[in-house]
Image: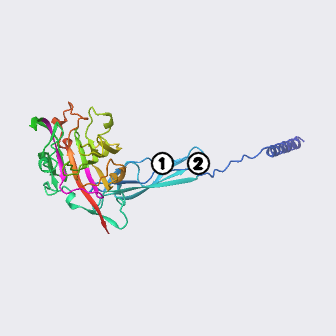
């Protein structure tokens, strides 16, 4: 009897549990998890083009790695191709690809190229396809105004280095006297080295305390040509320049005194004028029409400048400064192969012929101070170096 009661009690309890569970299931609603079908987003920077010095096989390139975003937190971005920022990139094109993956597995990607090139020397030094070439034309090097500065001999057939015989007779801006002995060719460079004299030199009634130098082309520069140099500035208060100088004569003409500055900078700043801020890390170009008594069309000197502020000091490395004197009223300036700035409203038509000029001089707006670099500086510190100068003209293909 007891066993029957125990059996029925067990069956009743089991039926109660089954019924209770069945009732609870019917009252609950199943949770619905939405499906994430929205892809993340990611944007890469533009392609980067850089040049390397001849003889090298790679270049260190820095860039900003992209980070993707998504409508739900937790997306992850990873680089799947190419090289990380700060790596040494080989000559050629390296494609860098980044992929962002969200928590649901959706992906988005972007890519950009790093193009590393070495200058060929058979056309103006410019990124990818070179400086613009008008239809049916090609760039041809003008050998008489180009020099790789190989060997150890200064080419007196191409360049003036003596102010007394270059047709300008400008011996410098006090207190720095132009000295031809400061011009040398060595280690693949034209070197213009500055100095402090042991004792002042008296020339033309002026006491000169320092020395620089000036080099000019013997062949005249013309509109339409492309002019460029690869230059590293010295580290002193003195200048490092590359420009076109024009002769002027009130009797025989031309009466206009023009000046086309391609690059003008200094190695170090002292107590400079406000307008000269950053002149030790600048690509500064200018067009001048200087005041002359016989130039009655204008009153006072006129200028139309243009510049690009650099992120590096001019003395930190070699920069390539280029100028396409495209027409008397349009002049384009290139920095390391890229268009940097332009002047399209010069103070006069630049339709005269001039001379390529490299002058290392002092300025009153950046005076010599107590710094001892003239006494303690190395040859590299005191020298503006020109790896090469090249001039190009357009000819029919």
Check disc 2 and report the residue beneath it: 103
Which portion, as a residue range, is magenta? 207-230
Identify residue for label 1.
66
Foreground pick, 55 / 163: 163
Q: Is residue 134 above or below residue 289?
A: below
Give yes or no for residue 311 being in the magenta stretch.
no
**Residue 182, percent from left and from top:** 14, 45
**CA separation, marks 2 and 1?**
19 Å
Task: Name the residue furthest top.
Answer: 370
Instruction: Count all numbered tags in the image, as a single digit.
Output: 2
SS assignment at label 2? loop
Determine the main secondary structure of the stretch shown in magenta: strand
Residue 88 seen in the current view:
no
**Where, quadrant-wise, is the N terminus in this rendering?**
top right
Q: Image quadrant for the C terminus?
A: bottom left
Crowd class of label 1 (few under 14; some 14 to 19; many from 20; radius 10 Å):
many
| 223 in the magenta segment | yes
303 and 83: which is toward the camera:
303
Looking at the image, is 151 positioned above or below residue 182?
below
Q: Residue at horizontal 18%, vertical 55%?
A: 149
Earlier-in-chain disc, 2 versus 1: 1
| Residue 128 percent coordinates (x, y) | 37, 59
User: In terms of depth relative to the viewer, which is nearer, 281 or 20?
Assistant: 281
Q: 232 or 270: nearer the eye?
A: 270
Q: Mark 2 Cα within 10 Å, few/some/many (few <14, many 20+)?
A: few
Residue beneath the point at 15% across and 37% down: 210
380 lies left or right of 202? right
On screen, residue 352 above or below 213: below
Q: Is residue 243 visible?
A: yes
């Amino acid at each position: 009897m007891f066993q029957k009661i125990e059996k029925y009690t067990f069956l009743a309890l089991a039926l109660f549990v089954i019924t209770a569970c069945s009732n609870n299931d019917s009252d609950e609603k199943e949770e619905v998890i939405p499906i994430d079908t929205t892809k993340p987003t990611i944007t890469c920077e533009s392609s980067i083009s850089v040049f390397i010095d001849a003889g090298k096989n790679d270049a260190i390139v820095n860039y900003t790695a992209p980070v993707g975003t998504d409508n739900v937190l937790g997306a992850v971005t990873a680089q799947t191709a190419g090289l990380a920022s700060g790596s040494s990139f080989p000559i050629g094109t390296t494609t860098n690809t980044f992929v962002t993956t969200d928590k649901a597995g959706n992906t988005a990607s972007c890519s950009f190229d790093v193009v590393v090139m070495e200058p060929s020397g058979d056309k103006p030094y410019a990124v990818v396809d070179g400086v613009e070439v008008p239809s049916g034309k090609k760039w041809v090097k003008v050998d008489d105004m180009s020099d790789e500065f190989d060997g150890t001999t200064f080419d007196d057939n191409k360049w003036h280095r003596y102010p007394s015989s270059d047709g300008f007779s400008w011996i410098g801006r006090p207190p720095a006297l132009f000295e031809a002995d400061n011009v040398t060719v060595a280690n693949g460079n034209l070197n213009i080295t500055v100095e402090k004299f042991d004792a002042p030199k008296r020339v033309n009634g002026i006491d000169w305390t320092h020395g620089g130098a000036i080099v000019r082309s013997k062949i005249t520069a013309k509109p339409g040509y492309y002019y460029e140099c690869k230059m590293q500035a010295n580290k002193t208060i003195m200048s490092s320049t590359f420009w076109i100088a024009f002769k002027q004569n009130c009797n025989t003409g031309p009466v206009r005194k023009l000046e086309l500055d391609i690059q003008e900078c200094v190695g170090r700043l002292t107590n400079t004028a406000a307008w000269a801020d950053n002149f030790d890390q600048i690509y500064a170009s200018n067009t001048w029409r200087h005041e002359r008594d016989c130039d009655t069309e204008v009153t006072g000197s006129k200028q139309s400048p243009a510049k690009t502020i650099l992120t590096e000091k001019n003395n930190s490395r070699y920069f390539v400064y280029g100028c396409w004197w495209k027409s008397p009223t349009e002049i384009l300036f290139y920095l390391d192969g890229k268009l940097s700035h332009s002047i399209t409203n010069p103070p006069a038509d630049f339709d005269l012929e001039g001379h390529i000029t490299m002058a290392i001089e002092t300025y009153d707006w950046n005076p010599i101070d107590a710094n001892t670099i003239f006494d303690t500086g190395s040859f590299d510190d005191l020298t503006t170096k020109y790896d090469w100068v090249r001039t190009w003209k357009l000819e029919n293909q």
